[in-house]
Image (cartoon, rainbow, N blue to C red):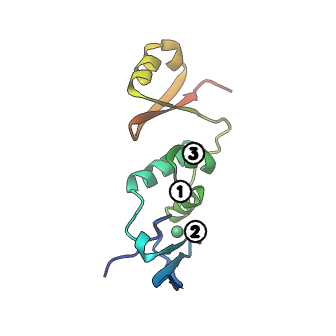
Amino acid sequence: MKLKLCPNCNSEKIIKSGIINNRQRYKCKDCKYNFTVNKLGKKIDDYYVNKALQLYLEGLTYREIERILGVSHVSIMNWVKKYNIKRPYNVDYHPTYKIYNAEELAKFFQNKSNISGAGVLVTELGDKFMLIKWERFRN
Ligand SMILES: [Zn+2]
């Protein structure tokens, strides 16, 4: 038997919730998402789960992560809970982030003033790159 997962948040805690148009309907106990059996199997790529949790640790809000990855903030909150992710410290400032293509990214690094006194993390995002930047010496 195939393992059933919620197509919205990957939770295994799904329950049957009636029949609609001759199709079995399910409800996810974690995110309350309703779906029919047709949607089963559209598992969210683990890549996005990892990415969402990574961004969460970088100090981004659920809504920001939703905007960047196109994954529901409810799903992200559930993953944070499911994997028991805790931020190791309170971020008192917010990292800034930008989405660049390869060419723009190269330009960014050519300008030394962009990266002096700062920490930078680059991560692939579809056909673009996301650059997260911290001002290291900011008070
Ligand atoms: Zn769910």
The residue identified by callout 2 is 31
Q: Does the Cβ of the disc 3 residue fall within 8 Å of ligand 1?
A: no
Name the amino acid type tagged 1.
Ile
Q: Quadrant of residue 42?
A: bottom left
The residue lying toward the viewer, choosing from 36 and 1, is 36
Query: Could you say where residue 131 lies in the image, as x and y percent from the top left?
Result: 48, 31
How much space separates mark 2 and mark 1, taking CA atoms? 18 Å
Q: Which numbered marker is on residue 67?
A: 3
Amino acid type indicated by mark 2: Cys
C-alpha separation, residue under disc 3 versus residue under disc 2: 18 Å
Q: Disc 1 versus disc 3: distance between alpha carbons?
A: 20 Å
Q: Which mark is residue 85?
A: 1
| Secondary structure category for the residue under label 1 | loop
Left or right: residue 67 compared with residue 37: right
* Dot placed on the residue nearer the N-terminal end, 2 or 1: 2
Residue 17: image quadrant is: bottom right
Q: Quadrant of the C terminus?
A: top right
